[in-house]
Structure formats: C-alpha cells, structure tokens
Image: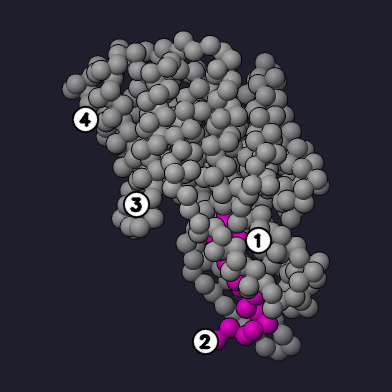
C-alpha cells in the first residue's frame, strides 16, 4: 500500500528518531508536534521493535505500522535528526526537504573508520582500568584486549548469528585470554582486566534509559528495554562464567588478588581518556566533542566531591549537575542537550557494579572487592532517576 505523500516525511522522521536511540516517549512527543505544525491530526506509538502511526482527516483514518530493529544510541545521528525536527516545527524547512535531509544524515552515519573505532575500544578499556585502579601489566593487557573487541563487533554487523552471541562470545574469549596471560604474568589483575575489556558492552546506560521510560509512564517500551538490558548483562556474565569454569583446572582463582600500584595522578587520567574514547563509538559530531568530554569530567568530579555523603546523594548531585551542564551547553551550541547529558550520565551508570554484583552471586566472591554491592547499584540507579526527575528532564523535548 502506497504511503500518502503528506504523511511520508513524518513516517520517515519517526523511523530516524527510533534508529538513533531517542527514547519512545520523546519520539511520540516529537511526532505529535511535527504533525500539529503541518496541520495534521496524528497519534503515534513507538515500541522497541515497531512504530504505529495513525492519521485522522475528516472521516477518514490512515494507519501505518512498520517493524524496525531496536534503536542503537548514536549521538551524532540523534543530534542531526533533532535539528531537522526542530526546523520542521519552526517552519524553517518544508516537508519536501525532510526526506532529503534524513537521507544525508543516514549516509553520514554509515561512514566508518575501523582504525579509529579499534583505538576507541582499546582506550575505553584502558581508561576504565585506570579509573578503577590497576597496575601497569593489567593496563597494557586491558588495552590490547579492548582492541581485540572491535573485530568481533564488526563481524556481528555482517552476521545475525554473531550479533546474537556477541556479548557472550567476546566475554568468553576475553576471559580465556586473560586467564592464560595470568600464567605468564602472575601480577595480572584478571578480574579488572576482564571487566575493563568488556565495559563497553555492559548495559548500564540502557538500564538507566529504560528506567527513564518506565518513570515517564511509558511502561511497555521501558519494560521491554529493561528486560533486554538485563538479558544482555546475563549474556556477558555467561561468557565470563563459562571461561572461568574452563580455566579453573589451570588457575586457582581463589588466590587472585587485586594489585594496584599506579600513581594516583595517572589513575585520574583515566576519566578524560574513558570519556574521549566513547566519542567515536557514540558517533558524536566533531563540534560537540570537546563540550561532551567537559560534561563527563565535571560530572564525575562533582560526584567524587560529594562521595562522602553516600552513593545515593553523590549520584543525585552528579545527575543534577549533568542536566544543568547539558542545558547550559544546549543554549550555547543549540545542540540537543541529550548529546551532552548522555555523556555525563554514562560516567554515573552502575553497569560495572551490576556485573560485579552478579559475580558475587555466582562465584561467592566479587571480581573486585566491594562491600554492599547491591546496595550501591540500587542507590546509584535511584540517584540517577531521582536526579532526572527533580531536574525536570522527563516529558521535555
């Protein structure tokens, strides 16, 4: 059935917003405002795997449903589509130009620099390893294992089967390699090295986003995304658990210790390093990179500054700061505040703590020694959601 021309740009806009990881309730808000601007009566429902468009005109109704894969957070595509949407709402461009603009954005996001992405995965692993505390040999191994992750990611884009098992396969491979290297380098922090290498897959940010949707009363989409995030976490832990089970006959994991002998100033270098490594992975546009890193660093240090008051309060303050800073940079650059907010929130999300909590349950000892791990995860999540609520993020464009 052919889509009427007057609805086509709205349908394509909804698809683009979904693909680039905009939360469902915001997509529905965007599409409603665009349709009102165009003088069209429309009702929209966005779910993780499909979008339903209903248009009303006099006594006639046009209904269009399209199944599309779950969106992946792409801050460059998100900010570009957001700009196109705002231009439509402010009537700077007409409907005939929208599809062309979206095609240009789609072509731009398909450009891939494999060397830069490999380096980004490597530096993300090294940066997180520095942040959590480690030694030189563990840092170097984490860097190399992080670089090894990207070929798996690339293969997963070419094969549905590898896409399905990506998290488990990478976790298993990293665990086997780190365990074997421990035989050669006894001072290697196996647990930290494993966690650092796969940190980019740990779904702390997606868990937070799903809770954001649930809190905004978008229960179906938020619930589905939360369950998907939890399954992703379990898939990763399955890979690690399988690797540890295989290697337990070779290595006595009970005697593994956490050795951290790096100078403190070097450890603090991990914060901007980790933040910068995420820029190519999230496909942040060049003009937004510097302020994105500034946001992440400020949020992290503010959280550390208030850490003496407890995890809940410090995370709450950090989230409030992330929203305030992203609003400020939004006014300066006109870039959607979500681009900066996500880079700030990613420094707070408890994905790694969730992973360590699972290790505590299944292995009777956390990969990294940490007391009250579940309490920390819960308080961090509550702090983020509370901060987003009190700062008035929900239900805003």
Q: Position of residue 376 (x, y in %)?
A: 56, 25
- Confirm whether residue 359 shows in the render: no
First in residue order: circle 1 vs circle 4 = 1
> What residue is shown with label 4?
246
| Measured Cα–Cα span from mark 1 to mark 2 | 26 Å
First in residue order: circle 1 vs circle 2 = 2
Could you tell me which secondary element the residue under label 1 belongs to?
helix
First in residue order: circle 2 vs circle 4 = 2
| Measured Cα–Cα span from mark 2 to mark 4 | 54 Å
Could you tell me which secondary element the residue under label 4 belongs to?
helix
First in residue order: circle 3 vs circle 2 = 2
Q: Is residue 161 left or right of residue 299?
A: left
| Measured Cα–Cα span from mark 1 to mark 3 | 28 Å
> What residue is shown with label 1?
81
Q: Main secondary structure of the magenta part?
A: helix
> What residue is shown with label 3?
155
When asked about the image quadrant of residue 137, the answer is top left
Cβ atoms at labels 1 and 2 below 8 Å apart: no
């Amino acid at each position: 059935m052919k889509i009427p021309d007057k609805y086509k740009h709205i349908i394509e806009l909804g698809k683009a917003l979904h693909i680039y990881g905009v939360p469902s309730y915001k997509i529905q808000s965007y599409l409603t405002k665009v349709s009102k601007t165009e003088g069209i009566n429309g009702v929209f429902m966005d779910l993780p795997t499909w979008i339903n468009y209903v248009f009303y005109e006099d006594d006639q109704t046009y209904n269009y449903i399209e199944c599309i894969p779950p969106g992946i957070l792409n801050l460059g595509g998100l900010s570009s589509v957001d700009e196109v949407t705002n231009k439509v709402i402010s009537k700077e461009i007409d409907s005939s130009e929208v599809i062309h603009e979206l095609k240009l954005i789609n072509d731009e996001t398909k450009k891939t620099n494999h060397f830069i992405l490999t380096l980004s995965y490597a530096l993300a692993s090294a940066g997180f390893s520095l942040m959590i505390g480690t030694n030189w040999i563990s840092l170097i191994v984490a860097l190399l294992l992080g670089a090894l992750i990207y070929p798996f990611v690339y293969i997963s884009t070419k094969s549905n089967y590898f896409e399905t098992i990506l998290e488990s396969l990478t976790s298993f491979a990293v665990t086997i390699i780190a365990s074997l290297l421990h035989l050669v380098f006894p001072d290697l922090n196996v647990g930290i090295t494993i966690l650092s290498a796969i940190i980019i897959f740990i779904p702390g940010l997606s868990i937070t986003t799903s809770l954001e949707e649930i809190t905004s009363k978008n229960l179906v989409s938020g619930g589905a995304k939360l369950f998907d995030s939890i399954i992703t976490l379990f898939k990763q832990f399955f890979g690690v658990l399988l690797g540890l089970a295989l290697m337990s006959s070779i290595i006595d994991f009970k005697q593994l210790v956490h050795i951290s002998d790096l100078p403190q100033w070097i450890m603090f270098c991990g914060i901007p390093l980790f933040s910068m490594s995420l820029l190519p992975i999230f496909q942040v546009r060049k003009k937004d990179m510097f302020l994105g890193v500034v946001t992440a660093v400020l949020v992290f240090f503010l959280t550390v500054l208030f850490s003496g008051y407890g995890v809940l309060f410090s995370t709450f303050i950090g989230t409030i700061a992330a929203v305030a800073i992203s609003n400020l940079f939004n006014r300066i650059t006109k870039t959607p505040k979500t681009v900066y907010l996500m880079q700030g929130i990613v420094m707070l999300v408890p994905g790694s703590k969730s992973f360590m909590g699972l290790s505590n349950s299944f292995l009777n000892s956390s990969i990294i020694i940490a007391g009250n791990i579940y309490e920390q995860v819960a308080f961090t999540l509550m702090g983020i959601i509370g901060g987003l609520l009190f700062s008035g993020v929900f239900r805003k464009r």
